[in-house]
Image (cartoon, rainbow, N blue to C red):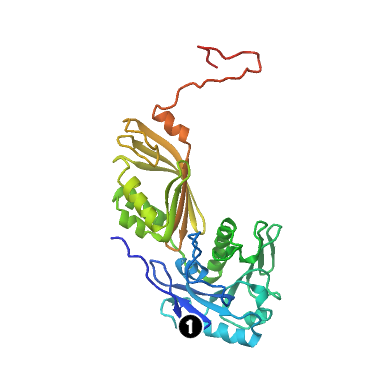
Amino acid sequence: MAHPLPSAKPERLTPTLTIHAPLSRHGNGPGIVIVTLRNSARETCHNETLDPEPLQKWAEEGFTVARLELAEGTSNLRIRDELGEATEALTMHEKCTNQSAYGLIVHFTTAFPELTEAIDGNGEIKAVVSFGALPAPCAKPHLYHLAEKGSKSTAENEIIYRYPEAKSPAFVLPDHPDFAPASAAVAHSRCLEFVKKHLGGPWFDLEAIWEEHTFFEFGERSVEKTMATMVQEPYVNHITTITGGIGREKLSAFYRDHFVFNNPEDTELQLVSRTVGIDRVVDEFVFCLTHTKMVDWLAPGVPPTGKPLRIPMTAIVNIRGDRLYHEHISWDQVTVLLQLGLMPEYLHFPYALEDGRKPAAGKKF
């Protein structure tokens, strides 16, 4: 039976503090605090992207999240008090695990010149991620994301990543004009690796999550159960034919009308290799089927030919928490057309060869 979608909502505890229970199927997880500039956060993400605001995104990753929205120039004493309230709220939250060991993520670092002292004074903060440099070096394990040219650098207790395409440290915020989706995705994966290492999780079996998803697609053939393995707003892109769906509504329609029930009964995925990262699975596989019905996502407009197909494919699957966020799947379409008998064995070659031979009717090179 498919799991229902997680339904936790953000809860505002004070004018500056909002807490969000994990949006994973597991339902609980370690705590993180997000510090951001007041009036910079939004309750919904930008209309032009599926990427949610950090509060929701980190909840989908399986964390219990406390967000602090502070005024620019908030004093050290005030920040200490606010951080204390945030970590206390996490400690008291029934869904928060690994209590008294929390991560901290900071946006708009230049707005808080006294932030570093407050961070070092909070014994429950075990790891710090900042988008932009902190006003002073931090004594705790620290991951920097800087909007500047350069390569990765490391020092004791510190990792620095640089993003030359980013216009500002706000490149990870989907509601900000400087949002850069590709750099934001890379930065988020790096954050996950760093934070999970220092907080001890949350850890999910990504292979099992992906295989559950494909079982519902090709085994049970259930659109509802397939979609239940995905985050609130997922997407699928079959890059070769530009088919799939963006967002829950359109992706559900694609699965229902073009995919789940359109694949022949003997469809099989033969795994060749698998690479598992902190938040994704990359598969090489052979997609096997007999072309007994129109498979319009694979060969649009081609009626059944009855031919057997064995198509090498690659799937890059991004998993957020214990649910899929997106799939990027690609293959060589010429291979499909050749196996369907829709490509000629030889193509006309209109150019002279280096040895002086010239193409002509009946000649084969």
Residue 288 visible, this orientation:
yes
Q: Is residue 333 above or below residue 259?
A: above
Q: Is residue 349 above or below residue 228?
A: above
Which residue is pictured at 49% across the width and 85% down the height? 14
Mark 1: which amino acid?
Ala
How far from the left and from the top, in percent, is residue 146? 67, 64
Q: Which residue is mark 1?
A: 89
Residue 99 visible, this orientation:
no
How far from the left and from the top, in percent, is residue 83? 57, 82
Q: Residues within 10 Å of mark 1 (few under 14, many from 20)?
A: some
Which residue is pictured at 61% across the width and 62% down the height? 178
In the picture provided, is 91 more to the left or to the right than 168? left
Quarter that holds the N terminus: bottom left
Given residues 286 and 55, the one toward you in this image is: 55
How far from the left and from the top, in percent, is residue 112? 66, 78
Displayed quadrant of residue 264: top left
Which residue is pictured at 56% across the width and 84% down the height? 82
